[in-house]
Image (spheres, rainbow, N blue to C red):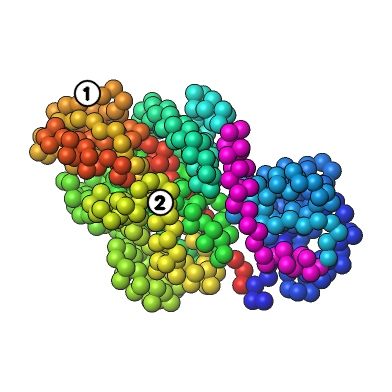
Amino acid sequence: MSQKIQILWADDEIDLLKPHILFLRSKGYEISPVTNGEDAVEQVQEHNFDLVFLDENMPGLPGLEALARIKAIKPALPVVMITKSEEEYIMEEAIGSQIADYLIKPVNPNQILLAIKKIVDHKRLVSEKTTSGYQQDFRNLGMAFNDDLTAQQWADTYQKLVHWEIELEKSQDAGMKEVFAMQKAEANRQFSRFIANNYLDWLNQPDDDSPVMSHNLLRKKFLPLLQEGKPQFLVVIDNLRLDQLRVIEPMLADFFHFDKVEPYFSILPTSTEFARNALFAGMMPADIKKRFPDKWVDGDDEGSKNMHEAFFLNEQLKRAGKNLKVAYHKITTLQQGKQLVDNANNLFSNDLVVVVYNFVDMLSHARSEMNVIKELADDEAAYRSITRSWFEHSPLFELLKKVAEKQIPVVITTDHGTIKVGDPVRIVGDRNTTTNLRFKEGKNLSYDNNDLFVIDKPEKAHLVKPYLSSTYVFATSDQYFCYPNNYHHFVNLYRNTFQHGGISLEEVIIPFAVLRPKAQ
C-alpha cells in the first residue's frame, strides 16, 4: 500500500497478540500496542491514528470509558471494540457510542483484516445512544449557561452544543430536537449578555481571560506556525461556522490529521468588511482607517470594502518581520476555483499561499434572495448538508488534496459565522444608515428593544465613526432589523434566513483548524 495505516491496539494481554501484530505488520500496517485504557487515551491525544482496536475488559480505565474519551478527543477516529463478553448490553452500548465494529475474543487475523474494511450498520443504536447521551448532558449544559463563564468556557460550551446538534440529526426523536433548540436559544441569550458585558474590556483592557479575536488571530495563532523554508497554506472560507467545519472534517480526515481545532472570537460587527479586514490587517477597523486612509472605504457596499486584503496581509507580515514570498487568491466563482486547481503547481513554490473562498457567504446571501435555496436550506441540518455537498464536489477540496500530496500543512479558518434569524425588531434611521439586517450604523437611530447591544461611542470599540453622532446597534440571539416602512413584507421576506453582523454563538465563536497532511 502507498500509505501505511496507523493502528493503535489497546489490550492488557497484548503480549498474547504478538502473532496478530506481526501478521498485520506483514500486510503493511503500522501497529502501536498499549496495555491499558489510560495509555490509549494518551496516545490518541499525542499521536494520529487511522484506527483503534480497543479491548473492552481492561484493568483501570474500562474500555467503554476509554472509548468515550477517545471519541471526545477525535470524533472521526474509527474504533473497533474487542470483548470476551457476548452480553447484548455491552455490544449495544459500544455500538451506540459509534464504534466502527466489534469483535468477540478469541479473534483470528482474518477477522481483524475484515474488521478494518467493513462498516456495520448501526443507525438505530446510534440514534438511541445519542438521545440518551444528550439527556444526560442537558442539565449540565443548562447549569453552565447561568454560571459566570469565561470566554474559553463559552467556546467549550458552544463546541458541546455543536456536537449534540450534529449528533441529534441522527435521532428520530423530534421532541428531543425541540428541547435542544430551546436550550440553544437560551444559550444565545446568555452569550449575548456576556458579550455586552465584556467586549469593550477585551479591546481596551485585555487580560488572560480575553479571547483571541479577529485582529490578533494571525499574530497569536498563525504566524508562530510559519517555518523558514517550509511552505504553508492559509484557507479562509468566508462565513464558515464551527458546525459546518465539523461536517466537512470527515472528508478532509482522509488526507489530513486535524492537529487542533481552536475556536476564536470574531470582532463586531461580525461581517466581512469589518472582521476579514481586521484579520488580514492585524488591527481594528478604526486603526486600519487611521493608518491606511486610502485603503478603507466608507459606505454600504460590502464588496468594495475588501479590495485590499492582500495589501493588509503583507503589511502585517512586514511588521512581524516575516520576509515571505506570498501568493494571495480570492475565489468568488466556480471558474476561478477550477483555474486555481489547474494552476496548483505554480502555488507550491511560495512560502505562504492564502486562499479566500466565498462560497458559504454567497450561499447565505443567496438564501435570502432565491426560493430554490430557501427550499434546499430550510433548516440548520439542511444548511450543513448543502455545505457538505458543495465542499465534496468543490475545486477547493480538489486543491486541498493536491496540497496534501505535496505534504504542505494547512490552516482553515474564517472571518465570521451566520445565524438563522426569526425575531424581527423595528428600527428607524436616516437614508445613510447601513442596510445590514444584524447591525446598524447611523445617526439618530430609534429602536425599542432592551436586548440590543448599543455602542454609542464607536471609538471605544475601535470602530470607524463616519459621523459625529454615529452609533452602532447590534441584534442579539436571532433578532433581525426591519424598518417600519413596508414592515410586514420584509419581516416575512427575511424570517428564517441566515444573516450575520450581530451577536450570537454561531456568528462570534468560529473555527481555527490546523491540519497536517498524512504521510504518503
The residue sitting at 54% across, 58% down in the picture is 250
Up/down of 60 relative to 3, above or below: above
Label ID, residue 193: none
Identify residue type, mark 1: Asp
The residue sitting at 62% across, 42% down in the picture is 129
Residue 242: x %, y % from top left = 46, 47
Residue 14: x %, y % from top left = 85, 57
Lateral position of residue 212 relative to residue 421, left or right? right
Q: Earlier in the sequence, mark 2 or mark 1?
A: 2
Residues in magenta, as a range: 109-136
Crowding at dot 1, Cα within 10 Å, few <14 / some 14-19 / many 20+, comes out as few
The CA distance from mark 2 to mark 1 is 34 Å
The residue sitting at 65% across, 72% down in the picture is 3
Q: Is residue 125 magenta?
A: yes
Crowding at dot 2, Cα within 10 Å, few <14 / some 14-19 / many 20+, comes out as some
Up/down of 427 relative to 406, above or below: above
Label ID, residue 448: 1
**Can the viewer see residue 292 in this picture?**
no
Q: What residue would you read off at disc 2?
A: 382
Q: Is residue 110 magenta?
A: yes
The residue sitting at 45% across, 73% down in the picture is 348
SS at mark 1 in the image: loop
